[in-house]
Image (cartoon, rainbow, N blue to C red):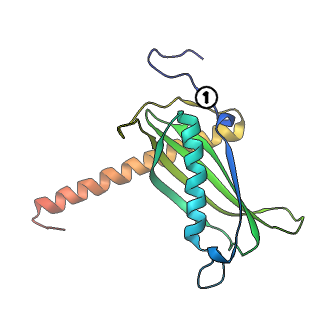
Amino acid sequence: MTQIPGELPGKPTAASRTTLSHIMTANDTNLLGTVHGGVIMKLVDDAAGAVAGRHSGGPAVTASMDEMAFLAPVRVGDLVHVKAQCNWTGRSSMEIGVRVLAERWNESTPATQVGSAYLVFAAVDADGKPRQVPPVLPETEQDERRYQEAQIRRTHRLARRQAIMALREERAAQGFDD
C-alpha cells in the first residue's frame, strides 16, 4: 500500500481491538431488577473510548452513538464482555463497533450477545481541536465487511444531518421560530 504524503501510516484492526469485562452487581440494576441500560451504555462508551484512543494514539472524544440495540436483558451476576474495534476512519473521526456479550459468572455456558452499538469518536489534541488519525487497515473478510457497512452508516448520518439542516432553514425562512 502506497502512503500518501502527510497521511499517517495505517494500523491494522487488531492493533486496537479491546475487550472490557465486568461482573454486574445489585448496584447496576434498574427498577425491574435487571441491569440498567445506562450501565451497559457506559461500558460500551468506555470500551469504544479505549479503542479510539489506542487507534488514534491519543485522546478521543465521543461524537455520537448510533444504533444502540439491547437484544436481551442482563442480570445481576452476569459477567459482561464488551468487545470493541475500529471499523472505519476518516480524517479525524473513527467509527467503533461494539458487541456486548453476557454469561453467568458461575456457569460454563457460552456467552450470548445481549447488545451492540456503533459509536463515532473524534481524535483531539491538547486544545480539544480535531487531529488526524491513521487509516484503519481491515485484516479479515469480516473486518472488510464492517468497514464497508461503516461507510454506509456514515453516508446515512451525513445525509440525515443535511436533510435536518435544510428543513430548519426552510422553516426559518417561513417565519417559524422553533
The quadrant in which residue 55 appears is top right
Task: Report crowding for label 1: few under 14, some 14 to 19, many 20 or more residues within 10 A (C-alpha).
Answer: some
Q: Residue at x 82, y 67 (%)?
A: 105
Name the residue furthest right.
108
**Residue drawn at the location 76% of the way across and 73% of the way down:** 77
Rendering quarter of residue 25: bottom right
At which x and y percent is residue 162?
31, 50
The quadrant of the picture occupied by the C terminus is bottom left
Q: Is residue 128 above or below residue 1?
A: below
Q: In front here: 95 or 35?
A: 35
19 vs 151, left or right, is right
Name the residue at 69% across, 36% down. 14
Residue 89 is situated, as x and y percent measured from the top left of the image, at 51, 36
Relative to residue 151, is residue 84 drawn left or right? right
Which quadrant of the figure has residue 167? bottom left
How many numbered marks are there?
Answer: 1
In the rendering, at what x and y percent does residue 156 appear? Answer: 44, 50
Q: In the displayed structure, would residue 29 be above or below residue 120?
A: below
In this orientation, does residue 117 appear? no
Callout 1 secondary element: strand
Query: In this orientation, which residue lies closer to the viewer: 48 or 118?
Result: 48
Q: Position of residue 66 (x, y in %)?
A: 50, 57
Q: Is residue 57 left or right of residue 157?
A: right
Residue at 56 percent across and 63 percent down: it is: 41
What kind of residue is marked 1? Lys
Observer-nearest of 31 and 3: 31
Residue 71 can be seen, yes or no: yes
State which quarter of the image contains the N terminus.
top right
Question: Residue 105, relative to residue 144: is it above or below?
Answer: below
Q: Check disc 1 and report the residue beneath it.
A: 11
